[in-house]
Amino acid sequence: MKAKSPFLFLLPILSAIVLLMSGCGQAIRNLTPTEIPMNPSNIYTLSLQIPEVEEGIAEGTLKPKVVIDGRARPMRRSSQGQQIWEYEFTMPPDRTNAVYYYQIDYQKYVLGVNSPRSITIPSDGLLKFSLINRYVVSLAANRGIVGSRIGLNGSGFQPSDQIFVGNVLATSIYYSPNALGFDVPHLAASQNYEVVLRGVRGDISVGSFRVDPAEMQVLPVSVSVLSGERSTLKFSIPTEAPAGGLAIYITTDIPESVILPEVVIPAGSKSTSVALGGGTPGIGVLVIEADGYSPLEVPIEVFN
């Protein structure tokens, strides 16, 4: 067997190997990723794509093997395609990585005679894959309203892990090493945001999450107020306001008729009340907006 270099050349998944079989213009491709999530069976698939349109390659003589721990292990054709060969490797219980290379034996038909050939991949070096026990499999839902609790399934979670939605820290809930949850933070509705899991080992991109508009309630549904007097408005939301409170923005098409207050639902609260003042007589609309909620319009009349 050919001696292998002690240096490791770690190839990413689907990287083309710059080694061609004699007479072939297509590259052989290693399909084994450098990192593979752990599984309960502790069995991991190594795969190799070998283009088989080869001039002079004797039919049925292609015999790829993967050499792990000095032992050559025959590969089988994959159900994924005729050009893909696989080997199911059982990782020893005390290890989390494996060093390997491929050996491809075949016969070349030259001048009426089959001549044995063999190549190794890579030609000078070794490949390696490692097991990882920290990953996110999926979000329980990919859209929801502010305040919704969304679950994450995966492995290797820790109580110190944090969830960010669109770079905003969400309230995170640790259930187990395989389950986390987070509450959708107050972000502008009808937009998609990247969800990121952040921990001591770095960031993991979880996926995209869409914030749908929630409903806010305002009472009364229409306002009548005397010029120079005040009318009380009550704002209610279905979930508790975030840290720092939830700012509510009020605008109107009759600014000289309405004295608009500053409105903030306090952190941890679901409602607040404010007094709105009447100015010069007029009839118009109050437009009420807040991040994560559908805008509301409240008719208003200010009279003498």
Image: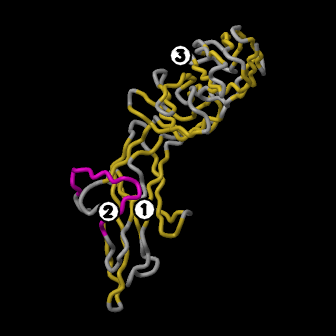
Q: Which residues are magenta?
A: 4-19
Q: Position of residue 267 (x, y in %)?
A: 57, 13
The span from disc 3 to disc 2 (Cα, nearest Å) is 56 Å
Residue that extends furthest to the bottom in the rendered view of this protein = 111
Q: Mark 2 falls on what kind of element?
A: strand
Is the C-beta separation of discs 1 and 2 under 8 Å? Answer: yes
Q: Quadrant of the N terminus?
A: bottom left
Q: Position of residue 140 (x, y in %)?
A: 63, 36
Q: Nearer the viewer, residue 125 or 303?
A: 303
Residue drawn at point x = 53 percent, y = 16 percent: 243
Residue 211 shown left or right of residue 170 in the figure: right
The span from disc 1 to disc 2 (Cα, nearest Å) is 10 Å
User: What number is the disc on residue 48?
Assistant: 1
Circle nearer the viewer, 3 or 2: 3
Indicate whether 126 appears above or below 139: below
User: What number is the disc on residue 243?
Assistant: 3
Q: Position of residue 105 (x, y in %)?
A: 36, 70
**In terms of image quadrants, where is residue 123?**
bottom left
